[in-house]
Each structure stands twice: as structure tokens, then as C-alpha cells.
Amino acid sequence: MLNIMVIAYQGVAIEDLPKTEVVEERRNQLFDAYIERMFHRPTRLKVKQQYSEVQTKRWLTWLAHRLVEQSQTIFFLEGMQPTWLQGKGERI
């Protein structure tokens, strides 16, 4: 979690950090900042982004829901089950 905080708030002045006493809000703000930073970080590779930010967030949300349904907190590709893929569009 500390690494996520370092990346999310790198270069942000203390007075500009979100101020809230609600833990869940603070966690959401942290992850929103982290995700935003990861989408806009400079990369060494000069390749076209294959998926849009919206598509990526949608699939990450889908994956998070499947993990919650399976009572998992860490994603392992080999842990995916065919039952996770409900429609033909998901079963490539």
C-alpha cells in the first residue's frame, strides 16, 4: 500500500493531498489517483495503446467483481475459471 501511495502522490504538495476523515473515501481517492497516474505515466515503448482508459477500467472492474465473487484478493491467471465467462462475447 505504501508503494501505491508513493506513486499516486509523487510530486503532490502535502497541502494538495485529499483531506477526509472517512477511511473508505481516503482509500478510494488513493486508488483513483494511482490509477490516473498509471494511465498517464511515461513509457519507454512507443506503441499505440491497445485499449482505451474506459475499456481498461471496465475490464478491471469486471475482474474485481469476479474476484469478490470467488472470495479472492489476489488475481492469478491460472485461477480463472470458465464459469467466470458468462456470455459468448467474453468467451473468445
Image (tube, rainbow, N blue to C red):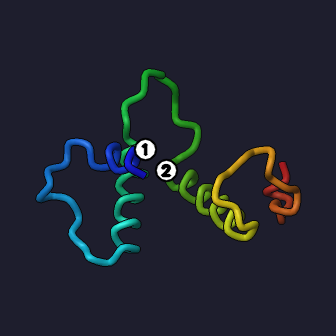
Q: What amino acid is labelled 2 in the image?
A: Glu
Vertically, is 89 above or below 42?
below
Provide the secondary structure element on which disc 1 rests.
helix
Report the residue at 26% width, 76% height from top.
Answer: 21
Mark 2 or mark 1, which is nearer the start of the sequence?
1
Report the residue at 26% width, 43% height from top.
Answer: 10
Is the residue under label 2 in contact with that under label 1 (CB below 8 Å)?
yes
6 relative to 54 in the view: left or right: left
Which residue in the protein does label 1 denote? 39
Count neighbours of disc 2 (C-alpha within 10 A) and say few if under 14, some if 14 to 19, many if 20 or more: few
Position of residue 47 measured from the top left corner of the image (x, y, whole percent):
51, 26
Q: Nearer the viewer, mark 1 or mark 2?
A: 1
Report the residue at 43% width, 21% height from top.
Answer: 44
49 or 7: nearer the viewer: 7
Position of residue 25 measured from the top left corner of the image (x, y, whole percent):
36, 73
- Taking the view exactly as shown, the residue that stands out farthest to the bottom is 22
The image's mark for residue 53 is: 2
Work out how far the residue at label 1 is from the one at label 2, CA to CA, in angstroms.
7 Å
Q: What amino acid is labelled 1 in the image?
A: Phe
5 relative to 19 in the view: left or right: right
- Taking the view exactly as shown, the residue that stands out farthest to the front is 2
Report the residue at 41% width, 58% height from top.
Answer: 31
Snapshot quadrant of residue 18:
bottom left
